[in-house]
Image (cartoon, rainbow, N blue to C red):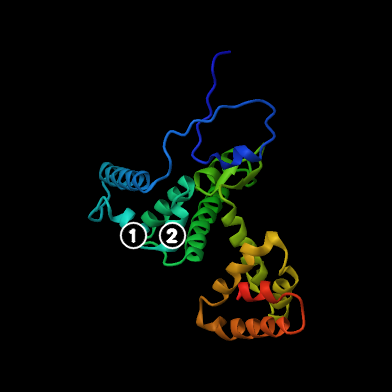
Amino acid sequence: MGNRLIITSHIEGNYFEDINFYVPRLTIENMSNDALKLFCSSYMKCINEISIKAGRVTRECIIDQLYNDITQNKDIFHLAIDPQLASVIAAVYNQYEDKLPEKRIDLYEKAIENMIERLVTSYIDSPTNYLNKELGLNATQAGLLNEFGHNSFRFIHRTFQEYLAAKNIIYSFGLERSENIIYHNIHDKIGTPNWRVPLSMTPGILSKSVEHSELFTSIVTRLLKDEQTTSYQQSSTLLV
């Protein structure tokens, strides 16, 4: 049958699969700063060429601008060492007129908004209006999902799933939950390892807007009071 190759930019998942035979793994290039710079410059050149061919009015393209903006933002730079996340960052950067979100949470939000917009458009345009193969392909092309079995998808990186889990603590079907429900959602999950990252994102989501400032302060105050009477002291402090 000849030799077979699997080429991937995200090899970590291989180590979690149940592979019962030896598979040699070769790294073509680590995601170093030089590799990131090459990716960013190639991406900017490609976007510029596509825009020119399509006859669209283009902004002045500075080849190193994307790389410079990424390296100046510690939160975003930490994500860019993952090749797949680097591609998501570049897509958000291009979509929002060559600007990067200041915070990691804002990047997740914009990337997911972009994915949902594409999925909704595909759903509306689909004559059958259900999740079929065509819509599945659009889901993967949106940049955040990988196909994982028949009509089954998962996020390319767990942090996007964790961000949505954090949003679900605060919102339900687009409506904000009450203070008590949000508080208990957080309180009941403190100390659970799988919820550590979503819980760490929750204060950032709550503190983003002025209208949430009182809600954020009230919930944090209640959590800090719990430290005096429960065994959650270390976890609560880290959360806040």
The answer to which of 235 and 66 lies nearer the viewer is: 235
> Residue sitting at 65 percent across and 82 percent down?
219
Q: In this view, does 9 lie above or below 109?
A: above
Report, in whole angstroms, how far the alpha carbon at label 2 lies from the one at label 1. Answer: 9 Å
Is residue 134 or residue 146 the one in the foreground?
146
Is there a contact, CB below 8 Å, between mark 2 and mark 1?
Answer: yes
Q: Is residue 56 left or right of residue 218?
A: left
Numbered label attached to residue 76 = 2
Residue 77 versus residue 232: which sits nearer the camera? Answer: 232
Neighbours of disc 2 within 10 Å: few (<14), some (14-19), many (20+): many
Q: What residue type is labelled 1?
A: Asp
In the image, residue 115 lies at what x, y percent?
A: 52, 53
Who comes first in sequence, dot 2 or dot 1? 1
Taking depth in this image into account, of 144 and 85 the one nearest to the observer is 85
**What's the residue at 60%, 85% (across, down)?**
217
- Kind of element beneath mark 2: helix
Image mark for residue 69: 1
Amino acid beneath label 2: Ile
Q: Is residue 167 above or below residue 43?
A: below
Give residue 19's quadrant in the image: top right
Q: At 38% from the left edge and 60% from the top edge, which residue is drawn? A: 96
For the C terminus, the image quarter is: bottom right
Q: Residue at left 52%, top 41%?
A: 10
Quarter location, residue 212 = bottom right
Choose top left, top right, bottom left or bottom right for residue 228.
bottom right
Q: Which mark is residue 135?
A: none
SS for dot 1: helix
- Does residue 94 appear in the picture of this structure? yes
